[in-house]
Every structure is written in C-alpha cells, then in structure tokens.
Amino acid sequence: MIVKPERVFDRVREWQGLAGFAAPQRRSSAPAGAALGVVSGRRRQGKSFLLQALAEVTGGMYFAATEATEAESLRLFTEALTRYTREVVEIPFRDWNDAIPYLFRCFRDRPVPLIIDEFPFLIRASPSLPSIVQRELGPGGSGRESAARLILCGSAMSVMGGLLSGQAPLRGRAGLELMIHPFRYRDAAEFWGITDPRLAILVHAIVGGTPAYRYEFTQGDVPEDLDDFDSWVVRTVLNPQTPLFREARYLLAEEPDIRDPALYHSVLAAIASGNSTNGGIASYVGRRSDQITHPLNVLEDCALIAREPDLFRSGRARYRIVEPLITFYEAIMRRRWPELEIYRAETVWQAVRQTFLAQVVGPHFESLCRDFALDADDTVFGEFPAEIGSGVVPDPANKTQIEVDVVALAAQEPGRPRRILSIGEAKWGEVMRRHRLERLARARDLLSVKGYDTRDTVLACYGGAGFSKELMVSADGDARVRLVDAERLYRR
C-alpha cells in the first residue's frame, strides 16, 4: 500500500486513484504492458506537488517539461532519464520516435510511475507526440513489453481535454483520467486555518480553494479575524508587490486558445457584473449573440467558466466564472487598475467594498449554498439530491419571475412527475425575514401547477446575516422549512 505523505493535505481520493494506478493491488487489475494515465486541472491546484510526492514514495521518475524547441526538450528529457536510470543514452534521440520506445524499454521489471508534467509544452513543439505514444502503447509497440505507468499531466485545459476526446490518438488508451479540482469550501477553510465561517466565506470569495494561494502567493498571510479582513485584502490581493495581484491576468494569458485577451476579459467582466445569460453578455460586450458563442466555448473548455442550466426552463442557462479570483479581478480590480498600481489600495478598497459585497460575495454565497445542498445527506431534504442547480419560476398573475437560488431535485422516475426535494433563497448581506419564506411558498405552488411533485418540498432560507425572530418562529417545528446560516454551512 502506497501511503500518502503527511505534507499532502487532503487529496485522499486523488491519492487513492494515483496509488492504485501506479501499483495495482490485484493482478487481475494490472493491464498487460505499459499503462497510460492523464492528470489535468487548472494551474496552482497542486498537481505537480502531488505527482512529485507520488514519484518520491514509489521510486518513480518525474520530468517537468518547459517551453522549448523539440531539440532542447529532448536534451532535457535525456538528462532527466540519465539521472534516474544512471545509464547514459549512447545514441542521442533524433526525435520522440526514438525517445518514447527507449523510455518504455527502460522499465520492464515492475510498475513504476513515469511522470511527464506540463505535457502541453511538448505537444506545442511536437504535435505528433500523442500519436507516437499511442503507437507505442498499441499492438507491436514497445509499451507491450514494459511495466511502465506513464502519467501525462498538464494545466492547459483545452489541450489536456483534447487528448482523450473524439478522434484523438489517445482516445480509449488511458487507464486513469484524473482531474485535480480546487479544495471544496470546507476543506479550503481548514487548509487556511480559518474557523470563523463568515470570514471563511469572505476569503473564499477571493481566493477560492486554490492551494497555491495559501503560502506561495500570500506568504502564509491569513486574516486574524473579521476585523482584519479589510487590511488583509489591501496587503495581499490589492498589493502590487504580491504575486496574487497579477494572478488573474496570468490565468487568462496562459491559455493557448485565448488569442484576443481584450474580448475574453470583456466577456468575463460581463459575467462578473451579473450579466450571466448569452444575450446579457453579448449586450454588455457590444457584440451579437452569435459572435460570443466561440469565446464562451473556449472559456468553458479552459475550465474558467461553467454553463449552468435553468432547472425549470428547458434550453435556458446561465454562465458562472469558476475561479473566484477572476471574478474579483474583473468586478473590482480591473476597473481601478491604474490606481492600484500606484499603491492606492486603501482608497480603492473603501470605494469598492460595497460592490465587492454585492457583485462578488453575494453570488459566491449562492454557489456555496448549492455546494452545501450537493453534499447534503438524507436528513436535510429527506433523501440524497440527484441534481442541484438554480432556476427561474414565472409568475404570470403578478407579471414577474421568482429566482430560486438553490434547487434540489430527486432522481427522475419514469412515468412520474419530477420530485422537487427543496427550493431555497440565499442572501448574504441582509437578515432574512418571513416574506422570503412566503416567496418560496409561492414558487412551490407555481411549480406544482406546472406538473412538479412538490408535496414534500423543503423551503430553505440560506442567510449569511441570520434570520429574523418572526422567520425563526415560523420555521420552528416545521419539517418542511430549513434555516441554514453560515455556521450550518460549514458544519460537516
């Protein structure tokens, strides 16, 4: 059994997947010949840290590619291979047609992870490399006589996503497809050492669950309490001397498929400003709807935004920025960039703090509430939810619409109406009162008329600032009402 090092925080399931791939416990699960694994995820999520730990524990080889020509990459790869095997490569590799077969032949005795990190750098200089790997893994290839566990890793999501898709050469070859995600919000709070749930939400609304921002980008600076939060923002993310200051810009610039940064920043700014529909984004950017389809698809492929369907209206969807730091940059920093560059962070923050609470923290709190519902056990809504999202309920009688921030649906049963386990509203900056519950009850009744099964629907109020006494009295003893505050959100 390959034990996870103590220095690796969390990542239990990810480690189990890597360990099982690197050293299969059952002979029946060990593939004949070499095996291929693909590890991907956005930058700063700890992929390299995790894979280096795996190589150290298992005695495997780790090679990190750099931006270089094919000739230089081959020289660097040869040097790494020589250091690992302690055998000199007598005949220099002419290209990867020589290098990959040699690599597989070096590892015939036991399953050992051979990790090539930043694989997209190699593909950029050598587009045929995935085909070469595919050939050597196939019948008659050098991989058939090898026990190597080849792991390809990269952060360019559009490139890594294309490795195993459609008609790609490596399609169907991988025995491991592992995506490294940011820490979930509860794990992120534990990683940062934050025990105050309201402070944890504020910090998460800026840096999310990206591990690198905890130490490398902030030098371990953590707000002591809620009173220290404003000062922490000024001395970290709004400080031109910290790496976090320009990080959001770099996240966009590092994606090879983004060739018109101005357009993509405008699209992201539109979403950060609350224009989350295709039409709203197009109007904000000043383009036709069909002209922003490609940028939206590219951003989605890069895992920078997510398209979330309206659970109550077929064909309707909203876009959400996945990385909180990008939302913070587009909504707060980008508009005041010249002032921030000349160290006017205190003045800028005082001016934009309310915008931060409304445009950044408010929507982010809603997404955390949906994460809470996703993790809910059967005691919260009566059973485990099958689908979580949001939706809009038309109210023709009042000529308005009711936006439902958190929707929990049961699994679809053939021949039966879809059961709604819960509908909820989330408010960060205001004390929730009884009229919020009445609004949810109205939405439930309208959904019942539309054919949904709402007999056991739980009405949930998610309140970052708490609840009025009247609302708490109404909810007391009612099994179909839930009040979820920040404390409950972080309780495991």
Image (cartoon, rainbow, N blue to C red):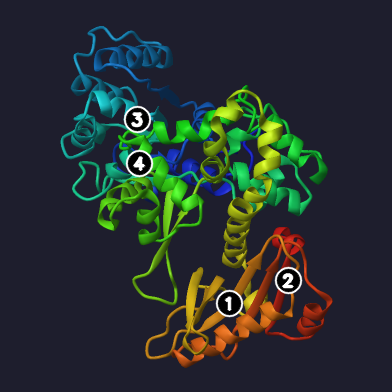
Disc 4 + disc 2, Cβ < 8 Å: no
Q: Nearer the viewer, mark 3 or mark 1?
A: 1
Q: Nearer the viewer, mark 4 or mark 2?
A: 4
Disc 3 + disc 1, Cβ < 8 Å: no
Write down the residue under mark 2: 432
At 18% from the left and 48% from the top, the residue drawn is: 167
Q: Position of residue 340 (x, y in %)?
A: 60, 29
Q: Position of residue 418 (x, y in %)?
A: 45, 84
Write down the residue under mark 4: 263
Q: Secondary structure at mark 2?
A: loop
- Residue type at the position of mark 1: Ile
Which mark, by number, is residue 119?
3
Q: Which of the two labelled residues, at mark 4 and mark 1, occupies the earlier sequence position?
A: 4
Q: Nearer the viewer, residue 298 or 2?
A: 298
Write down the residue under mark 1: 423
Disc 3 + disc 2, Cβ < 8 Å: no
Tell me the distance, in whole angstroms, between the alpha carbons under discs 4 and 2.
Answer: 39 Å
Q: Nearer the viewer, mark 1 or mark 2?
A: 2
At 36% from the left and 61% from the top, the residue drawn is: 279
Q: Nearer the viewer, residue 179 or 326?
A: 326
